[in-house]
Image (cartoon, rainbow, N blue to C red):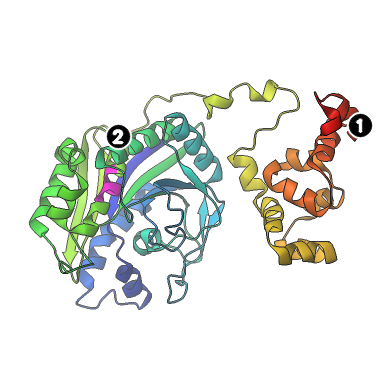
Amino acid sequence: MAYIIGGIGTSHVPTIGLAYDRQRQNDPAWAPLFEGYKPVAKWLEEKQPDVLVFFYNDHGNSFFFDCYPTFAIGVSPEFDMADEGAGRRPLPNIMGHPKLAEHVANRLLNEEFDMAVFQDRPLDHGCNSPLALMWPHEPAWPGAILPIAINVLQHPLPTAARCYKLGQAVRRAIESFPEDLKVVVVGTGGLSHQIHGERTGFNDTDWDEEFLRLFVEQPEVLKALSHAELIRRGGAESAEVIMWMAMRGAMDGQIRCLHQNHYLATTTNMAVAVYEQVGAGPREAVRAHANEQLSGVEDIPGTYAFDIAHSVKALGLNRFFWRHREPAFRALVTRDVEAAFEESGLSEEERALVRNCDWLGLIRYGVSFFVLEKFARVRRTSNLEVYASMRGESLEDFLATRRVPASA
């Protein structure tokens, strides 16, 4: 079974990544920060986790305010590093863990956490800024990441208590995953800082010390704090410590701090800490169907649930059909479908399914009908004709089964 071996709390200030990329580790202004991460890197090297579950926030690089999710989980096999306006950071892509991500997403939804699910979205400094200091990454990262994004930019934000409960649910999901995996949970953000308005530059390191103490000893006190109280104590942007609370929830119970460092260089008190559970070790596994709501669906003939596994497998093919919303792409498909295949990077198996208009085969492969029908329109094939084909019937035979076939 999978189990959590420890937790890390860390700031994710973008200048940390900038200083790292410019090799300023020995610069007197930055050395105290980098020294603080060395014990973290050593601990990770000793523990050799398979997966880091990152509670982080996206800073308007992969999500925007036209559709900004409260909670979102990344299920991609691989994640790129975001270009945040000054070029992509010189870091390799990092592996995801789609099977664990799917399992966690299913369990969270069934515990009434309404997660958005994302693929093909790069990770910004909310993840990659501290990650480079903790994990060696040349030529490749030593393990995988499971990113869980939390909205800390646009109010209303989830409460500290809700984030704690999210962490608890993530722990239960991890401990019910059947594969043997060592997992570290990471909470990012803060500590005290404010980077807007006349209060820009506000810090309170005494509050930061109190927060770090309460985090270990009395998390219930922190869970009860409102966003306004967090802002008053630590500055507007320090409310992102609710992501630390998600990590604390995943380590529910007694914990001990193995290492702690914080350093106020510019506008943010940059902190990092390592925690282990008191009485650490695998708990008794909780065996359960990953998605209890779908238990038994496989016994319903002719039914294919469009789930995360199929979505990950067929992402490129679903995107091919989804792009039929674009007039230029529709024109390309009509003019030269092979060029459209090439532009979309489809495999030969996927191309054959499209060439043959194998509607049922496409569904079985993992295509959602609601993007597939866009291609049918370009082919001047009605939905009724697609339905009949999937049933192995002529259109006439299918219409004969309808209540009012003449008006269909």
Residue bearing the label numbered 1: 396
Quadrant occupied by the C terminus: top right
Circle nearer the viewer, 1 or 2: 1
| Amino acid residing under circle 2 | Ala
The vertical placement of 81 against 381, above or below, is: below
Q: Secondary structure at mark 1?
A: helix
Residue 269 falls in image quadrant: bottom left
As drawn, the residue found furthest toward the front would be: 407
Which residue matches tag 2? 280
User: Which secondary structure type mostly characterizes the magenta part of the structure?
Assistant: helix
**Observer-nearest residue: 126 or 134?**
126
Image coordinates for residue 38, horizontal then vertical, percent: 28, 61
Give the Cα distance between marks 1 and 2: 65 Å
Q: Nearer the viewer, residue 325 or 337?
A: 325
Question: Between residues 356 and 6, which one lies in front from this camera angle?
Answer: 356
Residue 90 in view (yes/no): yes
- Report the residue at 76% width, 27% height from top: 302
Q: Which residues are magenta?
A: 241-245
Q: Which mark is residue 267?
A: none
User: How busy is the neighbourhood of tag 1: few (under 14 within 10 Å), some, or many (20 plus)?
Assistant: few
Ranked by sequence position, the earlier of labels 1 and 2 is 2
Q: Residue furthest left?
A: 206
Residue 393's spot in the image, x, y percent?
Answer: 89, 31
Q: Residue at x 66, y 46 (%)?
A: 313
Q: Using a 10 Å C-alpha cutoff, classify the residue at mark 2 as few (fewer than 14 neighbours), some (14 to 19) or many (20 or more).
A: some
Instruction: For residue 1, say whether it is visible.
Output: no
Q: Is residue 383 above or below residue 76?
A: above
- Identified at 77% across, 43% down, the residue is 362
Whether 163 is among the magenta residues is no
